[in-house]
């Protein structure tokens, strides 16, 4: 899974300016940015759910290789299923709150603000529902492999374990920092733009 793909898509769009943005420009570009945001979030949810399926398939293969000794991998699979459920929930939420073509501009702006605030909350809590569960699942699988495969000597080498631990911790920190950057540079300024536009819409 790679949540940074979502942040990368935001990067390819023009950065929002925030409160200093021109209202006329905001109004003229609202519909296109509204559609882009919906498409980005839909792609993210499907890609993440699909990546979860691939991850679970890999875990199942490891469990089969280890036999009964691989039972802790079931916990890792449950953690990945939990992460996947978040993205499934996001798709259900998006479907239920989708506006019809006759919705007013003000209603659409309010809906986009609500979506962006929700995404900001998700990103702020990413350790709780994404990075944390994935990290625990990887530790469980690595520990199960090391304990159940005596021939896997490299998995017991303190240098290897230390290096892997540092690398994995850096990857988690990088993912966290990317998402903090997305909130600061993409999400919050866009919320400010939409709030400014909403004040101008009767």
Image (cartoon, grey):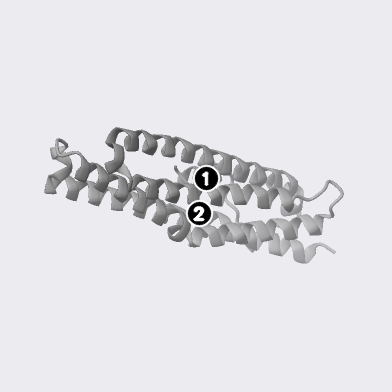
> For the C terminus, which image quadrant?
bottom right
For label 1, the crowd category at 10 Å Cα-Cα, with few meaning under 14, some 14 to 19 and many 20 or more, is some
N-terminal-most mark, 2 or 1: 1
The part of the image, by quadrant, that contains residue 61 is: top left
Can residue 23 be seen? Answer: no
Q: Is residue 138 left or right of residue 51?
A: left
Q: Secondary structure at mark 2?
A: helix
What residue is at 75 percent from the left and 46 percent from the top?
Answer: 31
Q: Which residue is mark 1?
A: 6
Q: Nearer the viewer, residue 113 or 16?
A: 113
Q: Nearer the viewer, residue 192 or 144?
A: 144
x, y percentage for residue 17?
A: 60, 56
Whole-angstrom CA distance, mark 2 to mark 1, is 9 Å
x, y percentage for residue 195?
A: 70, 64
What residue is at 81 percent from the left and 55 percent from the top?
Answer: 105
Can residue 98 be seen? Answer: yes
x, y percentage for residue 72?
A: 33, 48
Which residue, as the protein is rendered here, is positioned at the far front? 68
> For the N terminus, which image quadrant?
top left
User: Count of labels shown?
Assistant: 2
Disc sitting over residue 20 in the figure: none
What residue is at 28 percent from the left and 37 percent from the top?
Answer: 66
C-beta proximity under 8 Å, tags 2 and 1: yes
Q: Is residue 36 left or right of residue 107?
A: left
Q: Which residue is mark 2?
A: 182
């Amino acid at each position: 899974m790679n949540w940074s793909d979502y942040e990368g898509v935001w990067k390819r769009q023009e950065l929002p300016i925030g409160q200093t943005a021109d209202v006329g420009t905001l109004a003229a570009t609202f519909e296109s940015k509204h559609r882009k945001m919906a498409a980005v979030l839909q792609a993210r949810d499907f890609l993440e759910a699909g990546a979860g399926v691939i991850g679970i398939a890999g875990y199942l293969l490891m469990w089969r290789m280890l036999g009964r000794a691989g039972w802790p991998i079931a916990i890792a699979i449950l953690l990945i299923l939990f992460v996947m459920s978040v993205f499934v929930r996001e798709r259900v939420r998006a479907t239920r709150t989708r506006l019809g073509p006759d919705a007013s501009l003000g209603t659409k702006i309010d809906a986009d603000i609500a979506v962006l605030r929700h995404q900001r909350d998700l990103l702020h809590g990413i350790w709780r529902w994404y990075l944390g569960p994935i990290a625990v699942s990887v530790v469980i699988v690595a520990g199960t492999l090391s304990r159940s495969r005596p021939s896997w000597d490299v998995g017991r080498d303190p240098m290897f374990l230390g290096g892997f631990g540092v690398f994995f911790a850096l990857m988690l920190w990088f993912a966290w920092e990317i998402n903090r950057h997305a909130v600061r540079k993409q999400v919050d300024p866009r919320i400010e733009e939409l709030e400014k536009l909403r004040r101008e819409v009767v």
